[in-house]
Image: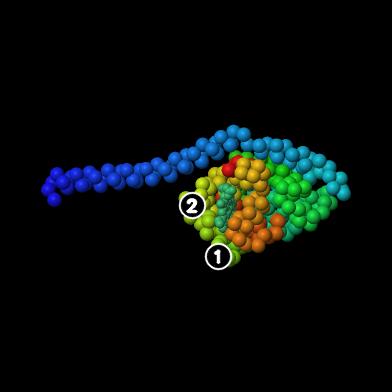
Amino acid sequence: MNKKVRLAAAVGAVALAGAMLPSAYAQKSAAVQSIEEYRAMLADGNPSELFEAKGEDLWKQKRGPKNASLEKCDLGQGPGVVKGAFVTLPRYFADTNRVQDLESRLLTCMDTLQGLDTKAIIATPFGKGEKANMTALATWIAAESRDMKFDLPQSHPREKIAYEVGKRLFFERAGPHDFSCASCHGGDNWRIRLQDLPNLTKNPGDGVGFAAWPAYRVSDGQMWSMQQRLNDCYRQQRFPEPGYASDVTIALATYLGVNSQGSKSVAPAIKR
Ligand code: HEC
């Protein structure tokens, strides 16, 4: 090969590489960009405010056989304190001797303060009746801690156990596809079609993963609580449905919440 030909071949190779690499890259970043633009557009009109208003109203309303409001409910910061509570949950509660997430704690208050039938609430499908009320309450309570940083306590032995159990559950592979949570959320920059799959084995950052739910889902026009998010991911994993507010879901939430320590909550977020 003479010098000229060699140079031409080299230029050709560079041009070829230049034609292929950046275009593949550009394609990917254009997709990412359009998703981001779509999300920004959505965020302008987040209908979560409607759910927040409903939740605040439910908190203050006298309801149930005991005709009481939830205003004396202790979410971990003392009776009636809502601001800041969301970013410290799940945590240990001495009165129930359990680690509880927001929704299981609300069930405790609905039972003790209002006398509502929590078994019936647990059995109600997501998005219906009292279950929709739970989601509205969780949405308002989360919104009261918007932009605050996650700070879950890990000092009580039960809180430490919840984290360790949650971690094991996260990596537990089973079911027809032998999937675990980590099969979809165990690495960086994973995606299914156009959906980002945050790496939940470490802190995914402000407003991602645990720090985004409850969230309004544009695709089905519904507000989803964290319990519903976990329930649906177990469905995607082809696992049996976990019990609502069960210890399994609370342990998983503790693992995700402690991993998100120090990240800002944007809940209620808006999702595709
Ligand atoms: C088969 C893949 C798959 C498995 C397994 C799976 N997920 Fe997901 N997960 C998804 C998808 C897809 C989304 C995004 C859904 C959407 O945008 O509607 C998601 C979203 C999430 C989110 C919200 C992320 C965010 O930033 O909004 C959390 C939290 C989550 N999953 C937790 C879990 C947990 C915990 C498990 C195990 C019990 C699990 N997932 C198992 C596919 C999976």
Residue at 47%, 39% (x, y): give it.
Answer: 33
| Residue furthest top as drawn | 44
Question: Which of marks 2 and 1 precedes in the sequence?
Answer: 1
Task: Please name the amino acid that badge 1 sits on.
Answer: Asp
* Mark linked to residue 233: none
Residue at 58%, 65% (x, y): give it.
Answer: 176
Task: Please name the amino acid that badge 2 sits on.
Answer: Trp
* Mark linked to residue 178: 1
Q: How many marks?
A: 2
Residue 60 is situated, as x and y percent measured from the top left of the image, at: 79, 40
Which of the two residues, 221 or 245, is positioned nearer the viewer here? 221
For residue 94, say whether it is visible.
yes
Q: Secondary structure at mark 2?
A: strand
For residue 254, say whether it is visible.
no
Q: Which residue is mark 2?
A: 190
Q: Secondary structure at mark 1?
A: loop
Question: Image quadrant for the C terminus?
Answer: top right
